[in-house]
Image (cartoon, grey):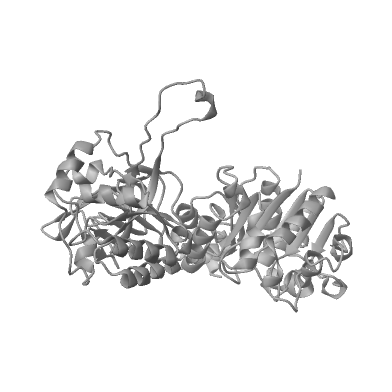
Amino acid sequence: MTEIIVVTSGKGGVGKTTTSASLATGLAKRGHKVAVIDFDVGLRNLDLIMGCERRVVYDFVNVIHNEATLKQALIRDKRLDNLYVLAASQTRDKDALTQEGVGRVLDELAADGFDFVICDSPAGIEKGAHLAMYFADRAVVVVNPEVSSVRDSDRILGLLASKTRHAERGDGPMKQHLLLTRYNPVRVEAGEMMSVKDVEEILGIPVLGVIPESEQVLAASNSGVPVIHDASSIAGQAYGDAVARLDGEEIELRFIDAPRKGFFKRMFGT
Amino acid sequence: MAAHGDRWRVSVAAGARSENADAVELKFGQVGIAQVRVRRNDAAALHAELERRVRAAPHLFERAAVVMDLSHLAKQPEDGEVDALLEAVRAAGMLPVGLAYGTSETDVLARRLGLPLIAKFRAQYERHAEPPRVESAASSNASSEQGPAPARHAEITTLKADAPVFAQHHTQPVRTGQQVYARGRDLIVVAPVANGAEVLADGNIHVYGALRGRVFAGALGDERARIYCSEFRAELVSIAGHYRVFEEIPAQYDGRSVQISLEGGKLKIANL
């Protein structure tokens, strides 16, 4: 049974691609056969984050237009041999995607025995985002703890509940998960940032993970290694937890409280 | 002229049993159907207005079955004029499927056109003397506006059904950008209504959950409509077009359960 998971948000720049890369990598590390697809045609980034941009020969659009086979276009990850990337085209636009074509590619992946297909959605609510979510069985909604991101995510949740195959079939509510990124507990405590509880209350869906704001995320993106590989970073560990929860484990949330000042720090200041 | 939805009951008289009874099945059902209430005998204006509506909401109106209500015209149009009106509706992209129940003249007209005459079924509304007319207040071109003939009213009285009109239930969260409209009835939402979402009803609105969005009760102008919610954080509330925006929610109502009603043209909020 192939499970199709869309990583979406509505708003841009909240960490969808970073999240897609880490979730796909994490699931692959747990032994699943995983494909991650970049739906952001025209602004492809996933291959950069996954560190395979120089190995892209054929892309998603080529496969949809029968200019290449899926096998030719799937790029095997250099670290995990059960992880594959399907890059977006840089030279086309989102109209190059068709619902029928996307459906065919997903069917083919299912026939190939993939356990998970991660669909990295573009920002916005236009065609690319629509097609990324249309076939999904589950959704991971990436949110930054600030009002405009929360508002856009609420809009996306509305679309997930109405504009997907899952909804059209009347299969009941789709499994939706909230993933908070760029979370800074110190600023939350200072009242400058929305808390996990605030966001959860407004959106009303369960939290899959909270990724703390961390410099390692940027460093990892720039070097083309998904941050989940970096076990020394708290963001990498938080993604690891999120993947485990996605895979059915129950783990308590970490990194959501501001670090307490120790005895010495309290005595002598920071 | 106004294109707006109404509830109609289409009745079919079932024939007596025979050996051919298995050849056909007569089923009764209720459908929502748009009503084109023609207020002026002006085919060109009718066409222009309906075409604008179809273009604005093609999903809703394109090839939509509509019932023609000619009872609001000052006088029954001539045969040729009726043909022109029907053609105007068709050309705009809607499909007239019948005439609304009016006078005996309408009946004769319907027979001549080979169209069914559909009896009105608006128990809730016509129980009270006159349905509120927001359209007439809003549109300035309602010059030939006429109240319904008394005879028509009498006929409708006998057609009333005693079945209550049940509220529309909504159990899913109403998300940003979504709209939920309970036409001709109350709306009950048992989920949160997000910022930027809209809930509307021709009757009352109940929200059991956080109400953060915009809420319009009495959408057709019924001033008796009320709004109830268990956690008040609305951006805007409106009853029968009287609205108030909340840039800042007064502390005594913020997050509390409240009731909102219209009293003397003013919105009144009260803690429950």
Q: Residue at x 32, y 41 (%)?
A: B167
Taking the image as shown, residue A39 lies to the left or right of residue B43, namely: right
Taking the image as shown, residue A73 lies to the left or right of residue A204, namely: right
Question: Which quadrant of the figure has residue B137?
Answer: bottom left
Q: Nearer the viewer, residue A5 or A14?
A: A5
On the question of residue A31 being in view, the answer is no
On the image, the x and y values in percent for residue A246 come to 68, 48
Q: Residue at x 53, y 53 (%)?
A: A162
Q: Quadrant of the C terminus of chain A?
A: bottom right
Total numbered badges shown on the rendered structure:
0
Q: Nearer the viewer, residue B111 or A199?
A: B111
Furthest residue in direction bottom, as rendered: A91
Furthest residue in direction left, as rendered: B264
Question: Which quadrant of the figure has residue A119?
Answer: bottom right
Q: Nearer the viewer, residue B14 or B9?
A: B14
Q: Is residue A146 above or below residue B218?
A: below
Q: Nearer the viewer, residue B197 or B48?
A: B48
Q: Quadrant of the N terminus of chain A?
A: top right
On the image, the x and y values in percent for residue A124 come to 57, 69
On the question of residue B11 being in view, the answer is yes
Q: Residue at x 73, y 73 (%)?
A: A44
Q: Residue at x 35, y 46 (%)?
A: B116
Taking the image as shown, residue B50 lies to the left or right of residue A185, namely: left
On the image, the x and y values in percent for residue A156 come to 54, 60
On the image, the x and y values in percent for residue B128 come to 15, 45
